[in-house]
Amino acid sequence: MSPCSLPAHRALLSAFSLLLLPLSLSLLEVPHIARFFGTKTRYEEVNRALLLDPLWVNRSVLRPPPGESCSPVHLTALIRHGSRFPTVKNIQRIRRLSELVRRAGGAEGGEATGGGPRDMLQEIWSWENWYTEDMDGQLVDKGRQDLRLLAQRLQRLLPSLLSEENSFSLKSSSKHRCVSSMEAFQEGLQGGAVGRFSHSVDDELLRFFERCRGYVEGVEKNRSALVEVKRFKEGGEMEGVQGRVALKLGLPPHLLTPDLVEAAFFLCSYELSIRSLNSPWCFLFTEEDARVLEYKSDLKQFWKRFHGHVISGLSSCPLFHHVFRTLDKAGRPRRATDAPPAPTASVLLGHAETLLPLLSLLGLYRDPQPPTADNYQQQHGRSFRSSQIVPYAANLLFVLFDCQRGPRLQLLLNETPVRFPGLPGDDAPLYRDVRAVYRPLLDGCDSARECEGRGGPRAQHRTLIGCRFSGSKI
Ligand SMILES: *[C@@H]1O[C@H](CO)[C@@H](O)[C@H](O)[C@H]1NC(C)=O
Ligand SMILES: *[C@@H]1O[C@H](CO)[C@@H](O)[C@H](O)[C@H]1NC(C)=O
């Protein structure tokens, strides 16, 4: 990415905002299933106003009590990297799918037997696979743009914390897509200038999940930890999707495995998030099919990264403590004699795997029943939807205010207010009340003990997190 491309990009954006007609046309071209792509969902799907104006900011999301005079003093932002290429595993599946479909199209002699429009099938048959293994999970241009625009929106939302005079703490996961995302975020902050701020890599904070033995052995490497996902994959709902998609493609259903069905679904998502295309692959799925596939992804995220296993949340203890230590420091009254002021913003760039365990530890998105292979029908109203929670460029914002009655803390997910589970009546509760809710974690949540499985406090936390917030719904 050249340092000069930002102003050009801005000019393009404002040209776009003047030309509403082509934009509303492109709105119509968004695939009908774009909201159901789980962690492969575009950020625009959770914030549709951005399709019209990518720099649109809703200032009323900041909600300290109207009667109290408050000013923001600190932002901690935990951000997921932007849109990226598929990883090798999915690139290989896409290749197998496109070869299978191409052979079938050839064998059919171009005869469409399915129920769908013929020209869509022709387009699928003649689709050229352009994904190569060296792309493996790298950030794409659209992903850089996701982060530049997010930085600019946050700057508009909190100008006193994110202007160029402020001091920032910037930390990223070591993965290429995260480092590139952090660079793009910095470009956004600096209005296109390069090199004013520097960031550091910190995997202890942002890739805690691979360092937590209890998590790696108990969940990551444990086949039975994801048994619900496996059962759903082999169950009736998925079989239904498989049959309908095979019929549209004119393929015998047994040739189309659940993995290949999912590859076609992801292909629709990638062509949208990388190239802004409504690809012919999207036409293979009804909205109901997409909901089933979304549920399959949610099951995986839930059992692998979320409330499914308490250790997932506990593995994020180092990040939890880091966030609260930063907020403690930022909330402390400052004296003129104090050494360098605390940074007004702390930006942490990681993965969906970084955000989900922390959200789990904080007790968010806990539904009355966990999602399983058997209760798809009862889960339509669930609050845990990875498409809404961890799309590309997902962000969890902790905004600390200085108010008359003391510091207050507000939480936002993807630029929308979210309430703390223990404090459902207040968008921006007093910081000391937030600390009281999380007191047992603030005093414990020792990753050495939790992750190495030493001693008994683990059982105690299980009770704390499992019961205290049970049934609370955000
Ligand atoms: C702006 O945010 C407020 C608070 O979350 C919300 O009630 C309102 O609907 C939002 N406005 C728009 C236009 O989305
Ligand atoms: C693997 O997961 C299952 C189901 O969650 C659990 O009962 C079992 O204890 C786990 N095994 C290990 C080695 O942690």
Image (cartoon, helix red, strand yellow):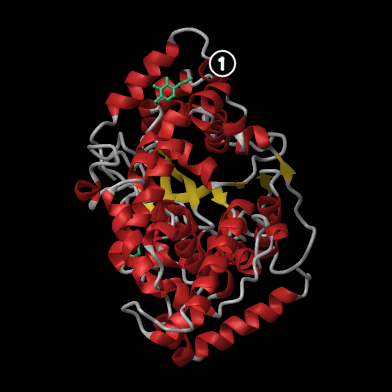
Q: Could you tell me the amino acid type at mark 1? A: Glu
Residue at image x 39%, y 75%? 283
Location of residue 163 with respect to 73 vertically, above or below: below
Identity of the residue furthest to the left in this view: 378
Tell me the residue at 49%/60% (across/down): 263
| 241 over 76 or under it: above or below | below
Lateral position of residue 198 relative to residue 241, left or right = right
Point out the quarter of the image occupied by ligand 1: bottom left
Q: In the picture shown, does residue 283 fall above or below 26? A: above
Residue 108: tell me if it is visible: yes
Q: Is residue 468 above or below residue 129?
A: above
Q: Which quarter of the figure is the C terminus placed in?
A: top left
Residue receiving disc 1: 452
Q: Considering the image in quadrants, where does the N terminus appear?
A: bottom right
The x, y position of residue 305, in whole percent, is 46, 38
The mark tally for this picture is 1
**Horizontal arrangement in the rendering, residue 411 relative to residue 54 (left or right):** left
Question: Is residue 63 something that shows in the picture?
Answer: no
Residue at image x 40%, y 57%? 254
Where residue 202 appears, as percent x and y from the top left, is 69, 38
Q: Secondary structure at mark 1?
A: helix
Classify residue 448 by image quadrant.
top right
**Position of residue 447 measured from the top left corner of the image (x, y, whole percent):** 55, 21
Q: Quadrant of residue 409?
A: top left
* Residue nearest the viewer, comparing 279 with 275: 279
Residue 80, horizontal then vertical, whole percent: 56, 51
